[in-house]
Image (spheres, rainbow, N blue to C red):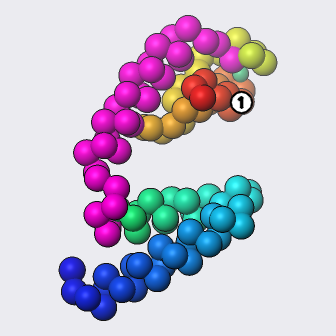
């Protein structure tokens, strides 16, 4: 990576960090902030990719157990993890979202 790109990423990281400090990433339309923060930090080598995929794998494993044990609290339907690495599952019958891991 050249110096200019590196400096640009660092400025972005600081900017995003400030937004997170202000709590903007917790707003309904602010999810991209923490996502982009991770991506930028990863591009700068601050977050090793291996750790992340290992964590996702651990979550997925736990989620396989959770969706087997837990049914939808509204309609008793089958739950399915929303996406790889997610701690939430979606009911396949009514579309309800459930937080299965903390
Ligand atoms: Zn349901």
Q: Name the residue under label 1.
A: 96
What range is drawn magenta here?
Answer: 43-72
The x, y position of residue 29, in whole percent, is: 70, 62
Name the residue furthest right.
Answer: 74
The x, y position of residue 32, in whole percent, is: 57, 63
Residue 77 lies in quadrant: top right
Ligand 1 is located in which of the four quadrants? top right
Which one is nearer the viewer's eye here, 56 or 8? 8
Residue at position x 56%, y 71% from top? 16
Residue at position x 48%, y 22% from top? 63
Mark 1 Cα shell of 10 Å, populated few (<14), some (14-19), many (≥20): some
Q: Quadrant of the C terminus?
A: top right
Q: Is 47 inside the magenta-drawn segment?
A: yes
Q: Is mark 1 on a helix, strand or loop?
A: loop
Residue 91 seen: yes
Q: In the rendered image of this protein, does residue 4 appear above or below residue 70?
A: below
Which one is nearer the viewer's eye here, 77 or 101? 101
**Mostly what secondary structure, the magenta segment?**
helix
The x, y position of residue 98, in whole percent, is: 67, 28
Q: Is 41 inside the magenta-drawn segment?
A: no
Ligand 1 is within 8 Å of the C-beta of the residue at disc 1: yes
Residue 30 seen: no
Residue 73 appears left or right of 5:
right
Residue 82 appears left or right of 25:
left
Residue at position x 66%, y 65% from top? 21
Residue at position x 62%, y 58% from top? 31
């Amino acid at each position: 990576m050249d110096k200019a790109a590196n400096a640009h990423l660092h400025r972005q990281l600081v900017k995003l960090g400030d937004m997170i400090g202000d709590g903007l990433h917790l707003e309904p339309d602010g999810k991209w902030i923490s996502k982009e923060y991770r991506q930028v930090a990863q591009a700068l080598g601050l977050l090793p990719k291996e750790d992340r995929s290992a964590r996702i794998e651990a979550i997925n494993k736990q989620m396989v157990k959770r969706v087997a044990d837990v049914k939808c609290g509204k309609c008793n339907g089958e739950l399915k993890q929303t996406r790889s690495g997610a701690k939430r599952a979606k009911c396949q019958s009514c579309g309800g979202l459930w937080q299965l891991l903390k």
